Image: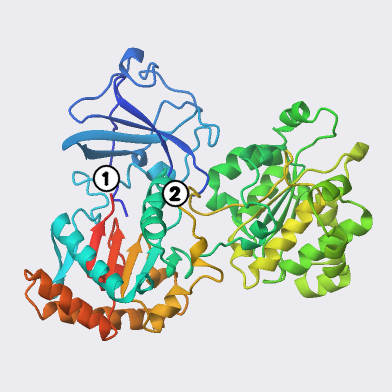
């Protein structure tokens, strides 16, 4: 964590400071920030011409001014070997966050590495290699040479299936595109690695295969749709805490009714009013509380569903909407198939749903009425469905995901303003890799294979299996045992004899050992078992 000094005064950003547009590198929302940097020997002045804000800072600023920044938005760092002041503050002009800063993004400067202010001193700055019983600093040439030789030796002897890879498949602030493209070119282009897993699950698969297989991408609307919806349905998502500025800047205006004028402009021939929201979550979250405050309790319906029964609830909604005729027949005919078969196959009565989900029949009906009953003038209701980990990390997420998409399709809420059936996401979704078709489905359960003694070399990119795997204690035990075999072998030969070192490592691998390479910016638990650690840029 960052250490906050007792700061009584912050330097004024000068008018000639270097300015970059940046994106918060934490959650999926993608809030815009301005990054200012300038020579640490100087600062700006209070006169409008002397500061980056162009205002008179000798006067008290208004409550909504953007001409300020907090201590968490400041740091003293090095650029090109020189000390510079760094300020990373929310961008008022960005339509995503409109100057709002979350508790994550508003600390990006503070969370930067700084020897002067003692922040993030755990940051890795040099490669480490296992040498004489401990991880020791080494040169990039030395570390990369060892990794390349061992990896090439193993592939030549055992084939590419002996190389296991763990790689984060998204990333913030643009890194998701640049970094995942690099790993993709290496493992899917230059090679065809099948035994690869993603940072938060032990296989290379999607969390939302269900919606994709239906032909509906999981990110199919825009933030403005949350301002235009008649009803928002939030399933297994705690948006205030996890997508803070998306919720505050786009959901709240609709819940308050302050986006009604925008709705009137967009939908001149429809009745419009403030949004209502249906929240499906076994727990009462801060999002439920915030919605009740902003929209009024009469416009918020919290369904405290029994865990794991979402599928029944969604099918009951679909059944009721179909029986009432609250479906979009033209859209169904033009864009879907087998609607009647789907309704028949997934029919669930209100009584069945109430018994299984723990939600009363009255509330089930109230929810689907808010979701699908036509508005005054018989206009179709615009409903945005938003879901996240509470749904997609369930034991039967494939069918559950599809049942929610079924309802969105049936009510014509895919591909129309104020609609959508979308995952909320966690980290940013920036992603770009060559085709992974060769991995196949079902994808290899990498962590299970490692426990079973499979694999010879393991490349780990920005992941920590010790925190994100199933059967974690067994995984840790076996992983340590296998990597210790290689460490013992490395201890047995002079480090300077590279040929002997590679032979010792590959001999240990043949005895069940595992050669581990960890790429990360800070020390991790799985990194303690690694033989080479490469500090990410």
Q: Is residue 448 visible?
A: yes
Q: Where is residue 20 in the image (x, y as percent from the top left)?
A: 36, 30
Mark 1, other Cα within 10 Å: few <14 / some 14–19 / many ≥20: few
Asked where in the image residue 78 lies, by quadrant, the reply is top left
Marks 2 and 1, the one that precedes in the sequence? 1
Q: Position of residue 303 (x, y in %)?
A: 74, 61
Label 2, label 1: how many angstroms apart (C-alpha)?
A: 24 Å
Q: Can residue 302 be seen in this view?
A: no
Residue at 36% x, 83% y: name it.
453
Element marked by disc 2: loop
Residue at 31% x, 19% y: name it.
15
Element marked by disc 1: loop
Check disc 1 and report the residue beneath it. 5
Q: In this view of the protein, which residue sits in the foreground, 261 or 216?
A: 216
In the rendered image, the quadrant that contains the N terminus is bottom left
Q: Position of residue 269 (x, y in %)?
A: 85, 29
Q: From what the image shows, is residue 77 above or below residue 310?
A: above
Q: Where is residue 60 in the image (x, y as percent from the top left)?
A: 42, 21
Count of numbered tags? 2
Instruction: Tell which tag, 2 or 1, sits nearer the viewer.
Output: 2
Q: Residue furthest front?
A: 156
Asked where in the image residue 393 lies, by quadrant, the reply is bottom right
Q: In this view of the protein, which residue sits in the foreground, 66 or 165?
A: 165
Q: From what the image shows, is residue 364 above or below residue 298?
A: below
Residue at 20% x, 31% y: name it.
40
Mark 2, other Cα within 10 Å: few <14 / some 14–19 / many ≥20: many
Left or right: residue 116 versus residue 407 is left
Q: Which mark is residue 303?
A: none
Check disc 2 and report the residue beneath it. 26
Q: In this view of the protein, which residue sits in the foreground, 450 or 122?
A: 450
Q: How is the image coloured?
A: rainbow
């Amino acid at each position: 964590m960052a250490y906050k000094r007792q700061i009584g005064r912050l330097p004024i950003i000068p008018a000639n400071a270097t300015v970059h547009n940046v994106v918060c590198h934490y959650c999926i929302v993608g809030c815009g920030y301005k990054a200012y940097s300038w020579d640490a020997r100087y600062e700006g002045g209070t006169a409008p011409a002397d500061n980056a804000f162009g205002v008179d800072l000798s006067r008290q600023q208004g409550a909504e001014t953007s001409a300020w920044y907090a201590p968490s938005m400041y740091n003293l760092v090095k650029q090109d070997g020189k000390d510079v002041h760094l300020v990373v503050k929310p961008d008022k002009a960005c339509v995503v966050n409109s100057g709002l800063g979350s508790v994550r993004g508003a600390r990006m400067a503070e969370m930067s590495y700084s020897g002067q202010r003692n922040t993030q001193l755990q940051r890795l700055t040099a490669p480490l290699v296992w040498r004489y019983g401990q991880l020791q600093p080494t040169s990039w040439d030395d570390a990369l040479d060892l990794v390349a030789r061992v990896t090439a030796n193993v592939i030549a002897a055992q084939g590419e299936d002996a190389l296991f890879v763990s790689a984060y498949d998204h990333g913030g602030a643009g890194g998701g595109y640049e970094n995942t493209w690099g790993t993709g070119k290496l493992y899917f282009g230059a090679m065809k690695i099948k035994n690869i897993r993603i940072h938060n699950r032990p296989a290379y698969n999607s969390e939302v295969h269900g919606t994709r297989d239906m032909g509906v991408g999981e990110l199919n609307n825009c933030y403005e749709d949350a301002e235009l919806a008649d009803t928002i349905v939030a399933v297994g998502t705690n948006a205030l805490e996890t997508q803070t500025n998306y919720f505050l800047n786009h959901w709240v205006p609709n819940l308050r009714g302050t986006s009604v004028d925008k709705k009137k402009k967009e939908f001149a021939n429809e009745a419009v009013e403030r949004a209502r929201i249906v929240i499906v979550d076994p727990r009462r979250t801060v999002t439920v509380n915030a919605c009740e405050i902003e929209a009024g309790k009469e416009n918020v319906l919290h369904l405290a569903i029994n865990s794991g029964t979402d599928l029944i609830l969604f099918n009951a909604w679909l059944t009721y909407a179909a029986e009432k005729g609250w479906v979009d027949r033209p859209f169904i005919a033009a864009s879907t198939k087998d609607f009647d078969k789907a309704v028949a196959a997934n029919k669930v009565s209100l009584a069945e749903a109430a018994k299984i989900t723990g939600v009363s029949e009255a509330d089930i009906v109230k929810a689907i009425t808010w979701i699908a009953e036509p508005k005054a003038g018989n206009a179709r209701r615009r409903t945005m469905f938003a879901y996240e980990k509470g749904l997609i990390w369930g034991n039967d997420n494939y069918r559950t995901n599809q049942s929610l998409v079924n309802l969105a399709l049936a009510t014509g809420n895919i591909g129309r303003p104020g609609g959508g059936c979308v995952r909320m996401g966690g980290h940013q979704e920036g992603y770009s890799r060559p085709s992974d078709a060769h991995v196949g489905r079902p994808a290899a359960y990498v962590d299970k294979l490692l426990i079973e003694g499979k694999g010879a070399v393991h490349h780990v990119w920005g992941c920590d299996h010790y925190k994100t795997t199933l059967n974690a204690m067994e995984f840790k035990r076996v992983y340590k045992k296998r990597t210790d075999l290689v460490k013992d072998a490395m201890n047995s030969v002079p480090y300077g004899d590279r040929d002997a070192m590679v032979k010792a490592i590959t001999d240990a691998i043949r005895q069940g050992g595992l050669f581990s390479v960890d790429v990360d910016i800070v020390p991790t638990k799985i990194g303690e078992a690694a033989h080479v650690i490469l500090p990410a840029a």
